[in-house]
Image (cartoon, rainbow, N blue to C red):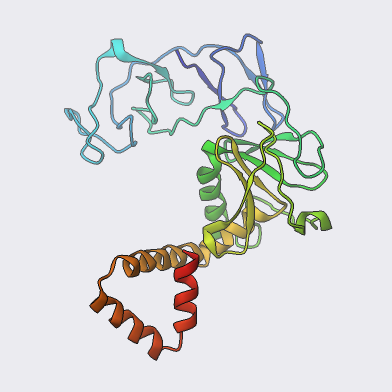
Amino acid sequence: MLRLVACPSCRTQYDVTRITTPVIHCPCGAQIPNQAPVAVDAPVERCSSCGAALGPDARTCGYCRSTIVRDLRLLGLICPECFARSPEKAKFCTRCGLKFVPQPAPGSVPEISCPQDHETLIARSVGGLICHECRTCHGMWVPADDFDALLNKAVTARRTRPSQGLGGHVHHERPAASFKVVYRKCPVCGDVMQRKNYAGRSGIIIDWCGSHGTWLDADEMEEIATFIFDGGLERSLADQEQKRASQMAGPSQMRGVFEHVKNDGTLLEFFSELIDF
């Protein structure tokens, strides 16, 4: 049965199901007692699948249509914040709505090395998510399951603190080697990672292992957040949708598209993007 504890300082959640050490040392510097909390019997007020608010007698979630579990015998996962019990596979606490984002406990996973300069990466807690940073080149390894969540936090930080990026960010000068076209190896499995232009046109090249995660050079997370904040991702998705519509269109519809781009003087760009899609 999954057992979670939360850091009292940075609120990072750790999976301590198989951890026997009495104290967990969080990368933020705090120490977390590895003790099973006393469960609290509380009313089910949130959907365990999506976190939406529920009526007192709801049998299904009005938002995601998931079945609501109220049988105490099936509620085994204890929230690390409010200590209410939720279903074992819950994604959200059924009392306070906390999203469960369990991270591997420090020391429970092997050390990994920087794919750029082979230095040992240092665990860092960023908004409740554990990433691994290189102290030499300041690149960052983001596990596959956490990339979108971390990016959302970076975009929020960019919106609320435009000059600071992801929480007090300091710009780092990248080594010249980071600008060369180099196919790096995944720090987890050792396979060569794919080089991907984020959103197809951002110009931000990230290194991606489909099984394990993404490597970001120094400042690339903040650059991606700025790209999204400035509407780049939305425009890219709209362009991709237009390309799909163009490919699926019939001859008469294509003639209309052709006339439109010809009149706008973007015929070359139209065919170029169609080929690259």
Residue 144 at least partly seen = yes
The one of 218 and 100 positioned closer to us in this rendering: 218
Determine whether, in the image, residue 131 is placed left or right of residue 41: right
Residue 237, placed above or below residue 213: below
Q: Nearer the viewer, residue 212 or 252?
A: 252
Question: Is 145 or 269 nearer to us in this picture?
Answer: 269
Task: Look at the image and tell me in which quarter the N terminus lies.
Answer: top left
**Residue located at (79% from left, 56% from top):** 174
Q: Quadrant of residue 110?
A: top right
Q: Position of residue 121 (x, y in %)?
A: 75, 35
* Residue at point 59%, 28% (across, down): 8
Q: Residue furthest front?
A: 251
Left/right of residue 224 with respect to residue 70 in the rendered view: right
Q: Residue 269's x, y, as percent?
A: 49, 78
Q: Is residue 57 above or below residue 219?
A: above
Instruction: State the residue at coordinates (56%, 63%).
Output: 227
Say which quarter of the image contains residue 87. top left
Q: Quadrant of residue 30?
A: top right
Q: Is residue 131 above or below residue 272?
A: above
The number of callouts visible is 0
Q: Is residue 160 visible?
A: no
Percent position (x, y) of residue 271? 45, 76
Q: Position of residue 19 (x, y in %)?
A: 61, 12
Which residue: 73% across, 56% down?
A: 181
Of the pair 139 and 7, the residue shown nearer to us: 139
Query: Is 147 on the left or on the right of 274, as rendered?
Result: right
Tell me: residue 70, above or below residue 270.
Answer: above
